[in-house]
Image: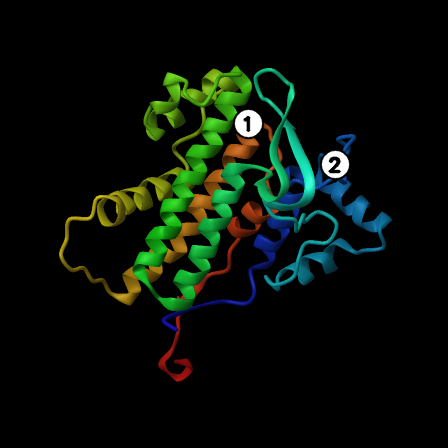
Amino acid sequence: MAFRTKKRISERNAYNMILAMAFHGNHYNDIHGHIRAVSDVKAHYAQNGRDFSRVIAHCRDFSQSVPIYENLIGAQWTAEGVTVSRPNHITGEYEPVVIGDGVYNESDYWATFEISKEDFDSAIESGRWERFLAAVNAGIAAVEAFMNHQYMTRFRVPGDDAALRESLETKMKTWPAKLTGHAFDLSGRSWASFSKLKKLRDDGFQHRKAITTGMSRKEHLGLLNEYKQAVPRLLLDLHVHFGVRCPSAIIRYAYYPEIEIESRAHA
């Protein structure tokens, strides 16, 4: 193993992760919109017999889920012997997405992110640069799929609409204002990290022209630690901007622990 992940996150990151899941996560514990402030979260935990400070301490162990607010259900569902239907985003009429035995995605951008995080985990475990680029590639696809999802559902246009062929950069610069009335802040760290890793993906994965490549472990490590800002943090920021609930897995990976080089003693 070339790299390893620290088992714990900081108290501040645990605190922020809990609040992000409470305020923006895809849980079903706030159907009446009562959880709006930190005091509401603390009161909600107290009502369920939990002390907020202890919840923070619990969540510093990254292997532990966030009580009450973390939805552990994934994007892909399995159907056996039934017909699953979803409303058409243009007509509102229900249409079958799977009949009999099969699988379906609750959301395609969410399912694509799950592939990205699986490749990311594998990239840390194996130390494979190409596996990391695959994680970035799927992450970029997830971001674009999210933007397309918002555009198609809000404007009620089909998947062959001409606007969907615009570049991702154009979509990010112009669509949020069209869809929400407010431009998305592209001056933050998440967009800078995303742009950096997207260029790496474009040059080193999608349009690779080199015969052989290499890099130091230190450089590789820095890029691995950039991922949480570039993909899950950007996706979380976009969910918040568009006012839609964010899958818990995306929020969790936005607070991913620091990655470090595996010492030779542990190799």
Q: What kind of element bears circle 1?
A: helix
Q: Quadrant of the C terminus?
A: bottom left
What is the basis of the colouring in this image? rainbow
Residue at image position (31%, 57%) is 130
The part of the image, by quadrant, that contains residue 221 is bottom left
The part of the image, by quadrant, that contains residue 49 is bottom right
Q: What kind of element bears circle 2?
A: loop
The part of the image, by quadrant, that contains residue 132 is bottom left
Residue at image position (81%, 55%) is 50
Residue at image position (55%, 27%) is 242
Q: Tell me: 21 left or right of 239.
A: right
Kindly indicate whether the residue at mark 1 contacts the one at mark 2 (C-beta within 8 angstroms): no
Residue bearing mark 2: 35
| Crowdedness near tag 1: few (<14), some (14–19) or many (≥20) residues, C-alpha within 10 Å | some
Residue at image position (41%, 51%) is 227
Up-down: is 142 above or below 156? below
Q: Quadrant of the N terminus?
A: bottom left
Q: Which mark is residue 242?
A: 1
In the image, what residue type sits under mark 1? Phe
Up-down: is 24 above or below 10? above
Callout count? 2
